[in-house]
Image (tube, grey):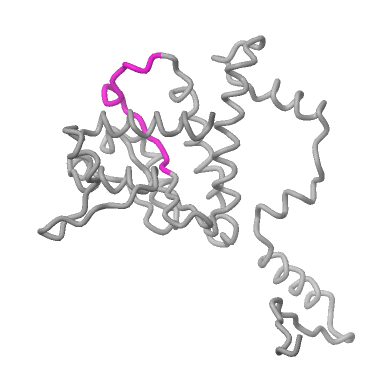
Amino acid sequence: YGGAPQYINKGFFIPTEVETSAIDGAFDQVASRIPVSQTFELDGDLSDEDCRRLMDRYRPEFIPEDDMLLTAFWIRYLYRRVSVLDANESFNYNESHDSLGSSLMETMLSEVKRFLDRDHNKSWIQSSYRQLIYDFTDPDSPEFRLICTSPESLESDVRARYEQLDLPGFFIPSSQDLHDRSVLDRYLSQALRIPLTVGPDGSKSLSCIDENGFILTLDFTLKLLNMHERVSCH
């Protein structure tokens, strides 16, 4: 091979006579360049016994200890969400928000009970409900979006945490947004990776909704998102 060498990693020089504080600063600089998801690998692999112990410790109360099928579904839901965190650049290289991961994980954990509910016919808009959408428009770098049934009813601490998240395209939708067909189309397009169709007037929508004679409401959107999560996790 006669081409020029490719240098991917950039290094820096530390003189031998520098003080310890300079060395500490160098280590901090190196650490800031390591994706958060890679730091977990430093803990090593868990044994089967460790995995079972952690499952027993964190298994939600609504999952019976002897219900292995529901436990398996619970693990698959969590694995999908952790995989999104693992690939999200804003999480991996976050240096400004101390509770970014915990704020997202809190919502992820609250979703699971609703997703595992066996009653598929209940109305999703009869209670205040919030859910993350995993935007795979770029398959290699998924992003987070938020949909909720009653934005004005969000607890003040939850609203404050969401408003502090410095994530691209992440915002709390208003009630008006959630009655806007184009907003619901965009949510489904991002989650299901179905491209929007540009109409004659320049508006973008999911043509499959109209072609099948469906009326896209917030409740129907949440049902579709729920079905998509079940398929993606099973």
Classify the position of the C terminus by image quarter.
top right
- Residue drawn at point x = 54 percent, y = 14 percent: 62
Q: Nearer the viewer, residue 34 or 48?
A: 48
Locate residue 36: give its quadrant. bottom right
In the orientation shown, which residue stands out farthest toward the front?
A: 1
Give left or right: position of 202 versus 224. Answer: left
- Residue drawn at point x = 75 percent, y = 90 percent: 2
Say if 223 sits above or below 117 in the image. Answer: below
Classify the position of the N terminus by image quarter.
bottom right
In the orientation shown, which residue stands out farthest toward the left?
A: 201
Say if 192 sits above or below 155 in the image. Answer: below
Q: Position of residue 84 (x, y in %)?
A: 54, 46
Q: Position of residue 121 (x, y in %)?
A: 32, 16
Q: Nearer the viewer, residue 179 or 58?
A: 179
Q: Position of residue 203 (x, y in %)?
A: 16, 56
Q: How many marks?
A: 0
Query: Does the magenta segment cover residue 128?
Result: yes
- What's the magenta region? 119-133
Give left or right: position of 137 versus 69. Answer: left
Q: Main secondary structure of the magenta part?
A: loop
Query: Does the magenta segment cover residue 177?
Result: no
Q: Position of residue 53 (x, y in %)?
A: 76, 24
- Residue drawn at point x = 27 percent, y = 52 percent: 196
Q: Nearer the viewer, residue 45 or 162?
A: 45
Locate residue 13: give its quadrant. bottom right
- Residue drawn at point x = 45 percent, y = 18 percent: 117
Say if 16 sits above or below 134 in the image. Answer: below
